[in-house]
Amino acid sequence: MSIDTLQQQTQSLAEAAQKEISEAHSTQALQEIRVKYSGKKGELTAISKEMRNLDNDEKPILGKAISEFHNVFNTHFAEKETALKEQELKAQLEAETLDVTLPGRKPTTGTRHILTQTREEIEDFFLGLGYQVVDGPEVELDLYNFEKMNLPKNHPARDMQDTFYIDDEVMLRTHTSPVQARTMETHDFDAGPLKMISPGKVFRRDDDDATHSHQFQQIEGLVIDKQVTLADLKGTLLLFARAMFGADRDIRLRPSYFPFTEPSVEADISCFKCGGAGCHICKQTGWIEILGSGIVHPDVLEMSGVNADEYSGFAFGLGIERVAMLRHNIDDIRHFYQNDTRFLTQFKGGHQ
């Protein structure tokens, strides 16, 4: 191939490259043009390979033409690349522009669990009556969980199938009554009466279903003083029922049996849904069972060092889940423990 032809091809190649550079609409397209014309397999490389076939006096002529191509190509390429980068940056900034005048998105916040809210409402009620809130161990001794509650060895209420035993003398507590026994042992009755509630988790070997759980929360109350009667218990429970379920509630006591109280009674409240007329919540009876209670058994007092001839008292126990289920018409106790946010976020508010 003659030197004239090679010079002409180089010139034509330069003109075509400049045209494509000027028409490029992105830096990616521009890079493709670079590869096309000056890459290792580019069109200018093909012309350069003809150098070996030229005479010595012709080689400088072609070398000069190739050098001029590179100078012009690189100049136009750099100018176009700068312009395209500016355009692309501007487009990116416009696409990512933050409008500071738009209202902000309110962050999602958690709320206290409905059982925590219910427990704190109950605690606040009894604190207002002068009670103290007392905590105790969840892993308990047989002595406090059963024996001091008037449940001696081999008592039928101590069924092995109802209790998580760690060994013969240690277990997960089945109620919070052991806290009451421990508190009676240390309370100074000369300084005043004992008025306490003991909230906390309790554990039973039970099959989980809509109304039962192997772990649930309980609050037990205890009042020990001179000349405490069943009337004091009924008055306290009436105030509690009206505070939790409405000012129109009434209460009734039914005979029952608990080893640690004598007499023992179940407490029912008049149905807050139907007002006593009968509905699905009260099972058409007009009454809803809410808790167990009674006058503290003299043996329980004596086993904790309290003189039963001088002092008497009443005790009661209720499930926090039951109160929450009744107040909010919840049909399955498992909702409380499955951590479904669709359920939990229904109960905003309460103590923060």
Image (cartoon, rainbow, N blue to C red):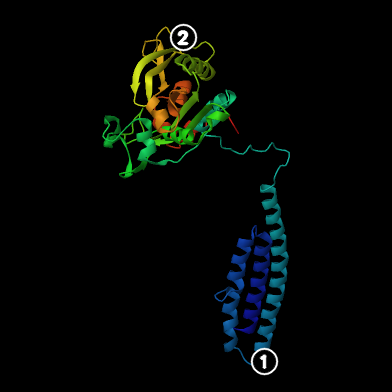
Mark 2 falls on what kind of element? loop
For residue 19, say whether it is visible.
Answer: yes
Mark 1 falls on what kind of element? loop
Precedes in sequence: disc 1 or disc 2: 1
Q: Residue at x 64, y 72 (%)?
A: 13
Residue denoted by label 2: 275
Residue denoted by label 1: 57
User: Image check: 294 left or right of 92?
Assistant: left
Indicate the quadrant containing the C terminus: top left, top right, bottom left or bottom right.
top right
* Structural distance between the alpha carbons of marks 1 and 2: 117 Å
Q: Nearer the viewer, residue 348 or 77?
A: 348
Callout 1 amino acid: Asp
When asked about the image quadrant of residue 204, the answer is top left
Image disc number at residue 66 = none
Q: Position of residue 284 (x, y in %)?
A: 37, 10
Q: Residue at x 44, y 24 (%)?
A: 315
User: Image check: 196 left or right of 87?
Assistant: left
Q: Is residue 238 above or below residue 174?
A: above
Q: Nearer the viewer, residue 156 or 49?
A: 156
Name of the residue lying farthest toward the top: 277
User: Image check: 123 left or right of 178?
Assistant: right
Q: Is residue 160 above or below residue 92?
A: above
Callout 2 amino acid: Gly
Q: Residue at x 43, y 23 (%)?
A: 309
Q: Position of residue 278 (x, y in %)?
A: 40, 9
Q: Label 2 near label 1: C-beta < 8 Å?
A: no
Badge 2: few (under 14), some or many (20 or more) residues near its Cα, within 10 Å?
some
For residue 347, say whether it is visible.
Answer: no
Q: Position of residue 71 (x, y in %)?
A: 71, 75
Badge 1: few (under 14), some or many (20 or more) residues near its Cα, within 10 Å?
few
* Nearest-to-viewer mark from 1 and 2: 2
